[in-house]
Image (cartoon, rainbow, N blue to C red):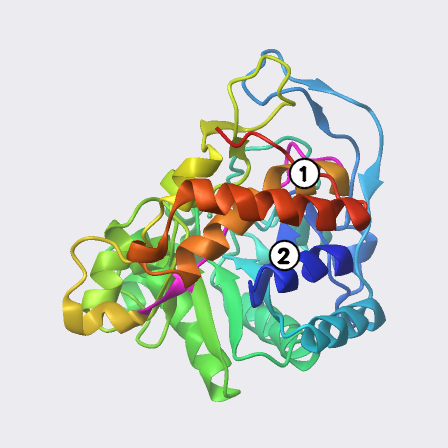
């Protein structure tokens, strides 16, 4: 992680978004809830090959680990010394199966589940009961203590509503609060968390699904499914971070070579990243200052180690940085490629792997 932060800093990328919880593993020590890591940080096995390969095959090997609070403190200080702010993400209400494996009482069914072993979207979601909010507030207290930055990312993406539809408590809550449906229940969930985080002097960021059912008043939207969410949020006066699938998913393939190592799919060549314009069409001129910047996403389902992560991230992260810090008039791809040739040698000195598909 420190090596990664070194390169972000060299590229003038001043923020590291650290996705610390998922269906497949809970990666941050929380003192009040030791089972989050004792149970939630480990899975029994992992999918082999691509999710689309049927039938699914598994490696049969236990996998896991987590960052202790002491380790995290060290990383936060290290990042500060390089002018990089870390934004932690604690996913809710979806992508939370690992938490439910540790504490099944937080789900709608309360039935035991195992930490996820295959990719894709699991149906698990936190049930919006008082016990859950108390749990999440306690978790966020420890997270805010560790990460001094302004923002806490609370996830919000890809929440299946099926369990909420079948849950007596969820349906009662919808009726009691006069909510229209499960989308509005999600909005209720996020707004409650926003209130809590705001009361501690911090702000939330959420993936663009948090717009559905009504956007929390002070939330910053991370626009990933496209730019529609960005346009809507910015025009209504909320801040936005751009991370659209079209230009910012560094887990996509970057070349058509047959020998290219396995990736989730998609195609995002270097030049396309360089061409990215972070201000989406449709944002009114007087609202453009709400587009705070953009981020490259490096989801690691198909990246087993740091060599693979850096291979996927570089040089696309360099192209993104130039796209963000340059005016359109000053952007010239062949020029960028010359700078990349210099930068490569710096990565080599640091023994950091990279891809070299510049065409
Ligand atoms: C996302 O890629 N699910 C935000
Ligand atoms: Zn429920």
Magenta-drawn stretch contains 294? yes
Residue visible at 61% across and 42% down?
341
Q: Earlier in the sequence, mark 2 or mark 1?
A: 2
Helix, strand or loop at label 2? It is: helix
Q: Position of residue 296 (x, y in %)?
A: 50, 50
Q: Could you tell me which residue is drawn at 58 percent across and 51 percent down?
A: 96
Marking on residue 54: none
Q: Which residue is mark 1?
A: 354
* Cα–Cα gap, marks 2 and 1: 44 Å
Ligand 2 is within 8 Å of the C-beta of the residue at disc 2: no
For discs 2 and 1, the disc positioned in front in the rendered view: 1
Q: Main secondary structure of the magenta part?
A: loop
Q: Position of residue 246 (x, y in %)?
A: 37, 39
Residue 355, placed above or below residue 96: above
Q: Is residue 30 above or below residue 276?
A: below
Residue 105: image tag: 2
Q: Say whether residue 212 is visible.
A: no
> At x 63% / y 81%, what residue is drawn?
148
Which span of residues is magenta-colored? Answer: 291-304
Q: Camera-side residue: 337 or 187?
A: 337
Can residue 44 be seen at all in this image of the molecule?
yes
Q: Do the CB atoms of the residues marked 2 and 1 lie less than 8 Å apart? A: no
Q: Position of residue 339 (x, y in %)?
A: 56, 48
């Amino acid at each position: 992680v420190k090596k990664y932060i070194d390169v972000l800093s060299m590229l003038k990328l001043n923020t590291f978004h650290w996705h610390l919880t998922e269906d497949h593993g809970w990666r941050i020590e929380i003192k009040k809830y030791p089972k989050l890591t004792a149970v939630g940080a480990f899975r029994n096995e992992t999918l082999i090959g691509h999710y689309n390969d049927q039938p699914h095959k598994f490696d049969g090997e236990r996998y896991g680990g987590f960052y202790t609070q002491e380790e995290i403190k060290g990383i936060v200080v290290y990042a500060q010394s390089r002018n990089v702010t870390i934004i932690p993400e604690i996913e809710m209400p979806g992508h939370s199966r690992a938490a439910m494996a540790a504490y099944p009482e937080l789900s709608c069914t309360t039935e035991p589940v195992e930490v996820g072993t295959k990719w894709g979207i699991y149906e698990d979601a936190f049930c919006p009961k008082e016990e859950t909010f108390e749990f999440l507030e306690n978790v966020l207290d420890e997270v805010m203590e560790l990460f001094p930055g302004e923002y806490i990312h609370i996830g919000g993406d890809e929440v299946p509503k099926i369990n909420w539809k079948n849950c007596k408590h969820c349906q009662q809550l919808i009726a009691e609060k006069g909510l229209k449906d499960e989308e509005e229940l999600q909005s209720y969930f996020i707004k409650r968390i926003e209130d809590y985080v705001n009361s501690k002097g911090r702000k939330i960021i959420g993936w663009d699904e948090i717009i559905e059912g009504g956007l929390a008043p002070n939330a910053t939207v991370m626009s990933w499914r496209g730019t529609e969410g960005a346009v809507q949020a910015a025009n209504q006066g909320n801040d936005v971070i751009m991370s659209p699938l079209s230009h910012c998913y560094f887990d996509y393939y970057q070349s058509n070579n047959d020998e290219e190592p396995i990736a989730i799919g998609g195609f995002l060549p270097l030049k396309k990243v360089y061409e990215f314009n972070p201000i989406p069409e449709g944002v009114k001129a007087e609202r453009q200052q709400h587009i705070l910047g953009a981020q490259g996403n490096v989801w690691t389902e198909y990246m087993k180690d740091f060599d693979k992560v850096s291979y996927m991230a570089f040089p696309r992260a360099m192209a993104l940085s130039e796209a963000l810090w340059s005016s359109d008039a000053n952007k010239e791809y062949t020029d960028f490629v010359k700078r990349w040739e210099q930068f490569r040698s710096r990565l080599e000195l640091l023994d950091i792997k990279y891809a070299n598909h510049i065409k």
